[in-house]
Amino acid sequence: METEKKYPLPPWDMDNAAEKLQLLENDWNSLDPDKAAANYATEAQMRFGTSFLNGRDEIKQFLAGKWQQNPGFKIKLNLWGALKGRMAVTFEYEWHNAENQWHRSYGVQVFQFDDNGLVQMNFASYNDEPIPH
């Protein structure tokens, strides 16, 4: 059986890390949980705010629910640093709730990738801020 790989692969320098990060951003902004979750290892760990997730299937379910609850979701990832198989990232994303109140969320996250370019661990902390009308 061939090992699943997601290119580009670590170790990272700032150029190939930026390329990888753009691919992750594109997949998240597709709002397709299968496509976005395919970037994560089968046994990946993720913490997104107060949600603690284990495994690609839980991550996929989380993303499907997040995007259903936060229509209009669009994220921007900004590379802060990269070394070996890790990346430090700042991010912001916008979304609105059922009452059509728009919010902007700001945060930082750390990615750990395996040798096949799949996310092993992803830890994100963020704050939400309502956008005035």
Image: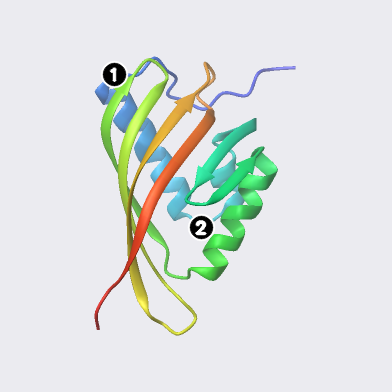
- Whole-percent x, y for residue 77 in the image: 32, 45
Is 76 above or below relative to 14?
A: below
* Circle 1: residue type: Asp
To which residue does mark 1 refer?
13
Left/right of residue 1 with respect to residue 89 in the rendered view? right
Figure check: 13 above or below 72: above
Helix, strand or loop under label 2: loop
Q: Is residue 119 left or right of residue 65?
A: left
Q: Which mark is residue 31?
A: 2
Find residue 104 and name its label. none
| Residue at 61% in and 54% down | 62
**Image point (43%, 54%), residue name:** 29
Estimate the spatial distance between the alpha carbons at disc 2 and disc 1, rounded to whole Å. Answer: 28 Å
Residue 1, percent from left and from top: 75, 17
Determine the residue positioned at 24% across, 79% down. Answer: 132
Residue sitting nearer the eye, 119 or 8: 119
Does label 2 or label 1 sit earlier along the sequence? 1
- Residue at x 42%, y 19% (from the top left corner): 85
